[in-house]
Image (cartoon, rainbow, N blue to C red):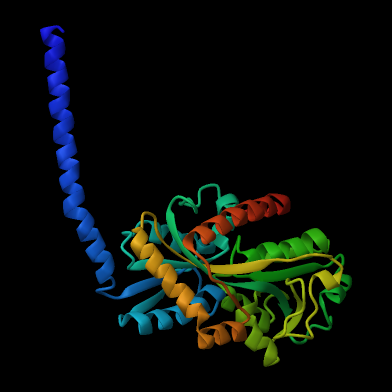
Amino acid sequence: MKILDKYLLKSFLITFATVFVILFFIFVLYAPLSWAQTQAWPTKPVKLVVAFAPGGPADIIARLLAQAMQEKLGQSVIVENRAGAGGNIAARFVTKESPDGYVLLVTTSSLAVNQTLYKEPGYDALKDFSHIGLIAISPNIIVSHPSEPSADLKEFIRNYKGKNVSYGSAGIGSTPHLTGDHVLRVLGKLDAIHIPFQGAAPALNATMANQVQLASVALPPAVPLIKSGKLKALAVTSLKRLDALPNVPTVSESGFSDFEDYTWVGLFAPTKLPNDLLNRLNGLINEAVRQPDFRDKLNAAGFEAQTGSPQYFNDYLKLELTKWGKIVKETGVSPQ
């Protein structure tokens, strides 16, 4: 072997050995530190960033979850609403935070919708988040002011053929928005105009004030208003009638067979959350939703509790991205 070749080989081996030693010490020094930090978590208040306004599905779930987490952890859990851009503002905010478990995102199926709806939502739903867990699902519902003469959705569509109809939702690209557009405009052939709001509660308030004729929202925030007579329910998007609202027909009963849509709520963290902490947070969710009191509160609000692993939630999200991406393209809905 030539002297130059021997020199280059020796230099390579020395460099390789040096890099190996450095990486070994980094692992030895920092791996226990990361593990210790995970075990110590939380040492300060945890923030749940909600992607929509107070009173909507994500907000209701976040406040129930915050209370359950706080009781279990012995640490403050703060709920912060960052509404706007169909949930994108909150999502983008959380992606810029450290993956240490102190800032988490509570959002809805809008996260899946927005990947197709917006040309550049500012994040990748699969790559930019750690998917902690699916918490609950709920059908959507179409409601009107109590003075609306139509008894149900089928009659409403019949009464408003050839007339302009306005409907509100929790925001552009929310699943209730797509539900409303699909049912009223695509299937019902109505001249339906969408009025976006920053959350379900403002959309429902506008309906009660007769500022819009209808609201298409997730079920939970509408249930107490329907039961108190402040709103009239025209149809739900579940396949079967709901125990909570047995007199309200389904969209399928209204002439659109096998129609079914749901809004889901889940918990996310910035990407690269340590696995130990990811599993610990997932365990907190599953433990919370298994508690009878928690489940009763979910059911009373119109939610169905969900449990599962982070991998299950990741797989579920992939299916939702495909489903809602197709619906966005079929309806032609855009952010503007």
Residue found farthest to the right: 158
Which one is nearer the viewer's eye here, 224 or 287?
287
Quarter of the C terminus within the rendering: bottom right
Q: Residue at x 15, y 41 (%)?
A: 22
**Residue at position x 73%, y 81% from top?**
242
Judge left or right: residue 87 versus residue 27: right
Which quadrant of the figure contains the N terminus?
top left
Where residue 311 appears, x then y in whole percent?
Answer: 50, 58
- Indicate the quadrant where residue 228 lies: bottom right
Locate residue 296: give its quadrant. bottom right
Determine whether 90 is above or below 119 in the image.
below
Q: Residue furthest front?
A: 1
- Whether residue 209 appears in this view of the structure is no
Name the residue nearer the viewer: 40 or 243. Answer: 40
Q: Which residue appears at 86% of the width and 65% of the height?
A: 162
Of 218 and 276, nearer the camera is 276
Task: Point out residue 59 in the picture as x, y percentages from the top left corner.
Answer: 50, 76
- Does residue 68 appear in the picture of this structure? yes
Q: Position of residue 139 (x, y in %)?
A: 67, 72
Where does residue 98 sit, x and y in percent of width and height? Answer: 31, 59
